Structures are given as C-alpha cells and as structure tokens.
Amino acid sequence: MAKGGKKHKKHQHTLLLEAVMAFFKSQPTGLHNYKQVCAALGIQDATERLEILELLEALVANGQLAEPETGRFRYLYNGSSYVEGRIELSQRGTGYVVTPDHPEDIFIREGDLKNALDGDTVRVHLFARRKGRKAEGEVVEILHRARTEFVGIVDLSPKFAFVVPSNQRMPIDIFVPLQDLNGARQGEKVVVKMVDWPEHAKNPVGEIVKVLGKPGDNQVEMHAILLEYNLPIEFPEAVEEEANRIPMEIPASELSSRRDFRNITTFTIDPVDAKDFDDALSIRKLDNGNWEIGVHIADVTHYVKPGSLLEEEAFKRATSVYLVDRVVPMLPEHLSNGVCSLRPNEDKLTYSAVFELNEEAEVQQVWFGKTVIHSVRRFAYEEAQKIIEGEDGDLKAEILQLNALARKLRARRYQRGSIAFDKVEVKFRLDKQGKPLGVFFKIQKEANELIEEFMLLANKSVAEHIGKPPKEKSGKGGGVKPFVYRVHDKPDPEKLNEFARFASQFGYKLKFNNEAQISSSLNELMKQVKGKGEQNVIETLAIRTMAKAIYTTKNIGHYGLAFPFYTHFTSPIRRYPDMMVHRLLFAYMEGLQAEREAQLETHCKHSSDMEKLAAEAERASIKYKQVEFLQDKIGEVFQGVISGVTEWGMFVELVENKCEGMIRLRDMNDDFYSFDEQSYSIVGKRSRKRYQLGAEVMVKVKRADLVKKQLDFALYEENQFSAKPEPMQNRSKRNKYRR
C-alpha cells in the first residue's frame, strides 16, 4: 500500500510538473506568481497550492523557469531559436540586436520590435534562416529598458498632451495626461518619464518630472543635452557637504611622511581657462649631469576614500564632461578646483613619477611615490609657447630644457610606430548669454606637446612597472597582477584598405603592407594634409578607421601610441580610472590587497561607457552651437567639403568654420540622384554627375533647426568647383563648374 501510494504521489507530481510547464510555455513572455498559476490550473487546495510554490522554486533552481522579480516567474528559453541582447534602432525605425549568443547582428523589422527602444535588452525569437539572407527575428520580450526618461518638447491639446522626444532614436511621442504635466506649458522643453506602455497602445504613457524651460535658451539647451545622455547637472547636497568638510590645510604629520619636492622648481602648464590642475612638472640638474624630471599628479585618493559618498559619486560619473560652455566635473568644486588642484604658491599632496633622464631623454631610473610639492608658477599654454618661440619669461631655461627633452622623447616614439593624429578642435567665442559670436580652431603647439610627452612617459612607466613581471622588465611577457590598462586594438585591415582607397582620390598614396608601414604612412599623410581643405575630413576618417581606446584589465597594448603597456595615471581629478590606477599602484608598492580582477573589469567597462557618453554629449553641444551660429546666416554661401554620403543625402563640412550640414537628395531636383556605396558618391541617373566624398562644393545655408540640431544646405547654383575631387597636382587647373 505504501509502495503504491508513493507511485501515485510521484505520478501526480509528474502531471503537475507537466501542467505547470505547459502553462508557462503557452505564455512564454508573461510574469506569473504562484497564485496566478494555481488559478489557471484550477487548484484551490491549500496543500496543493503550497506544492505549486515549491515546484516553481525547484524549476528555477533547475534552470527551467526564471524569477526576474521576487515571487514572479516566467518561462526560460533554452532552445537555440531564442537569444538575448541589446537592440540598436536605426533612423528608419528598424533595429539590430547585438548579442554574444549569435555570430552576427540580428535584423528586426519595424513591425517586430514589440515596443523595444534603442538600447533596451530584449529576448528575440530567431526566424528560420533563408539561404543568402541575413539573420532576422522578432522581439518577444523586453527584459530591461535602457532608459525611461526622455527630453522633449510639450505639444499641448485641450484634453491631453504629448511630449515629442528630442532624441531621434526615440521614434515615438509620449502621451501625457493633463494631471501629469507638472506645470509644463506648450512648447516648453521638459524631462518626461515613461510609466506605462499598454500592450495594444501606439504610444507609451508618461509623466513630466522636470520642466527645463524655453527652447533656445542656452542654459536650458545645455541641461537638456546632459539629461539626454543621462549625465548629471549638479551634485547631490550630501556629496557637496561631504566635500566641503575636507580641510584645505595639510597636517604636519602627512607632510613628514612624504618625499618633499617643495624646494625643487615646480610649475604647471594648462589651458588659459583651466581651474583644475591635475599635473605639475619639476626639474633640476643632478650632479652626474643628468636631469631629474618629476611628473606630479594630484593625490585625489588621499581625500576620496572607498565607501564615501564622494567615491560613489565619482564612480557613477566616471569622468568630467566638457560641453561648449562649461565643465561638469567628476568631483565637487571644493576638491576639483581647490583642495586637489595644484594651484601656484600652495603646498599640495601629490603622487609622483620621478625620472632620471640623460641628455638624450633616455630613462636611467624611475621612482614612484607619495610626495608634497609647491608650484611656483602657473603657465597658460600660450605663455609657455611664447618662451619656446624665443621670448623672455619666467623659468625660461627650465621650459626650454623640458622642451628639448620632450622633442627627443617624441621623435623616438614616432620612430617606434606611434601615430600622430592632430585633429582640429573647434571652439566658439560666446557672449555672456552663451550665444556664439565666432568660431576658432584650437591648434596643438609645442607647449601642448611638451606636457603631453611627459604625461605619456608617466602613464607608460606606471603600466610597465605593474604590468611586466620582475624577471621580464626588459621586454617580453604580460601582466601578472590585476591592473587597469588603457588599450587600443589594431585597425581592421578592411577599413584600412577602404580608407586608402578614399585618400587616393585626393592623390595621396598609402602603403599598408605591414604594421610599420601603417604608422609611417599615416604620419606622412597627416603632414601632407595639414592646412589643406580636406584636412579635417581625412583626419576624421583616419580616426574612424582606428579602433576605439578603452579601459580593461586585459592588456593588448596601445596600437596608436605603439606602447606595449599603457594606462591613465595623470588626471585623477577628471577621470575615475586614474583614481583606480593610483590605488592599485599604492597597494602593490605597499604589499596590500588590491581589488579582484572581475571587479576591476566591471569598473573599467563602466568607465569606458561613461567616457563614450561624455564624448557624445560634447559633440551634441558643439553641433547645437554650430546650428545656432548659422541661424542668422540663412541664404549665405560658403565653400565646403563633402564629408559623408548616405542613401538620403550628403553631408558637407564648411571650410571656414567646420560646421556640418546635409544636402538632401530630395532637394537636388536637377536630376534623380542615388547613392553609390562602392565609390562613396551620389550619382545623377541622367547626367551621370557625381558628388564624391571629399569633393569641394559651394553651398548655401538653407535651414538651421535648433530643436533637431540639424543644418540643411543646398548646392549653390554658381558652383565654382568640380564635384569630383582631382589629384592635388591638378587643382590649379580647375575649371569653373556650373549647374
């Protein structure tokens, strides 16, 4: 009897298991608690209901169900026809899912998105693969929203409102009930939070959480850009209070525990408008005729301790953000511009890399450690440059000696394969309201390169000190201790060949047969394009050809600098990875326990992601100011260079001010034009007229849309330039071109 009872109980359990799994398979994307499962299966007995709960927990443990929320369960796909990944939306409204579970990106048609938005983590059902077709699928579940808050413009109606998002990758307007307007008025720029998206509703439902103000106001627009990229505007009050409690004065006990550089000539060289001085240089001649050069970096981690609110906020931000008219710092101003900043005529705590160099700038030995310095002078780059160019000034001998050593370091670096990218940096002259009055270009000169060279030396040396095992300090081998590296992968050969093909249209010949040829060929190209109309286009495309530099614990070297070991040590006021490096260097030198590699890698990934967001926000602020600058120049004619071609038009960069706008194919009505991907060009069907990437054209400013940050150009009727670029040697023979 007992034996039969056991068999019956086992049979009942099997039937119950099958019923539960059939229920979840029938609703594969739904979340259900045990009460809902019991109701669906018609189970009312208290004992059986408890058994269902235990069964659900067992199925989670066995990997057959998932429990994304406590007490709520869903079906867990194990079949190869389902994958999870991050979706990226195109401007057409279609999407691609990027996932490590599939060898290629998965194409998602607009009707199969299931309300997924750009950046969301989704589950995708893969369609049966058809021969010769790319992988396709449909979104069956949204696992995680990348964001729920959006910046947009209020469009108010008598009974409801919509917010039209500013982000072009958010293709849907958000419905807002009148009671959730939070005081917002027609046409105002706001932050709206998406609170619901009913299954069959066309639009999500939201509530306005912040009113920014009127579009076009500089403060409103800069705040909108920061919020659009999920970047902070201000510090929480508690973080500010914690920072303000840190005293400016340095205790005598701390001074006595450090190597003292206060009597050695030390100074800073920074941008004229800088307030946070991360780094200083010291110089003195040694008795043996060599030079002692100290690279002194603000000792931020002495003040920002693990577990503090300051630490949490610094990690969250990961970087300072530089918009056109402001800096959004990683650390509160009391630290970034005060306590930690290496201001002149003040004692400051630093972490230093001190080098002994001979007259050929060869490192004889290096010392790392905690120091105290006293900067005697703060130079702007322009002041130091005048001294380098022959004018008299403070510390002239020291600056000239440092520059002589920097030149030798730089020459040796280029000989070893470092690539000399020197992209033009666009700056605006702004009035007190932030309105752009003019454009100028920031150019790197020797004073900038002097500082850069010693920062590179310090970064490289710190990475080598930790990354090379002691027995392999002379060359081979990788790191044996977990560490934070700044790495830059080798370029994709296919991208290099495409770039060479593009550059050849201007008469430039590139050779990419081996790694040495790549760097020397690119460096020669950068010299040849300097000052030419196509300089910015070629430099921009050359940089795009390269891989992106990132932070990681897995060292593969820095290709662009030709360094086998490289890190970021020299800017802890504005970069969180530098703080990580300071802590790791100190821990290893003192024999202390460092963070685990997995934790470091997570922090590296976050820092790389935040760096990318900050760069995108900076570009958005520049784009906004470019549109604003040309807003009162509608109808004016400028010389430009075709900087991009797509199937819907061509981008043109104006030579005079580097503003970029689009000529849309639909506006080119003298012919039917189409995009020729092979030749990077737009071609007329009847006339065979060709507008090629890099071609010089004359354009008229047609429209400047501040809301969308878009410039529209039209080809100027009396165009004086050929639409097809000619080799450089033939440009003096250019014929006048008329449409």
Image: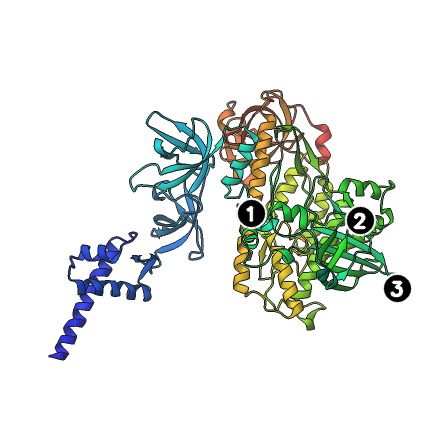
| Image mark count | 3
Measured along the vertical axis of the image, is residue 221 above or below residue 246?
above
Q: Residue at x 20, y 58 (%)?
A: 38
> Does residue 551 appear left or right of residue 44 in this picture?
right
Mark number for residue 612? 1
Res 738 → quadrant:
top right
How packed is label 2: few (under 14 Cα within 10 Å), some, or many (20 or more)?
some
Q: Nearer the viewer, residue 27 or 571?
A: 571
How packed is label 1: few (under 14 Cα within 10 Å), some, or many (20 or more)?
some
| Percent coordinates x, y for residue 497 in the rendering | 60, 48
> Does residue 106 appear left or right of residue 252 in this picture?
left
Please tell me which of labels 3 and 2 falls first in the chain: 3
Measured along the vertical axis of the image, is residue 670 above or below residue 447?
above
> Does residue 550 appear left or right of residue 729 in this picture?
left
| Percent coordinates x, y for residue 187 in the rendering | 45, 27
Residue bearing mark 3: 288
Please tell me which of labels 1 and 3 falls first in the chain: 3
Q: Nearer the viewer, residue 231 or 210?
A: 210
Q: Nearer the viewer, residue 44 or 239?
A: 239
What is the distance, in whole Å, between disc 1 and disc 3 at their CAs? 46 Å
The amino acid at mark 3 is Asn
The reply to whether discs 3 and 2 touch (Cβ–Cβ < 8 Å) is no
Q: Nearer the viewer, residue 222 or 422?
A: 222
Label 3, secondary structure: give it.
loop
| Percent coordinates x, y for residue 440 in the rendering | 69, 33
What is the distance, in whole Å, between disc 2 and disc 1 at their CAs? 36 Å
Residue 155 shows in this picture: yes
Residue bearing mark 2: 376
Q: Quadrant of the C terminus?
A: top right
Measured along the vertical axis of the image, is residue 714 above or below residue 288?
above
Nearer mark to the viewer, of 3 and 2: 2
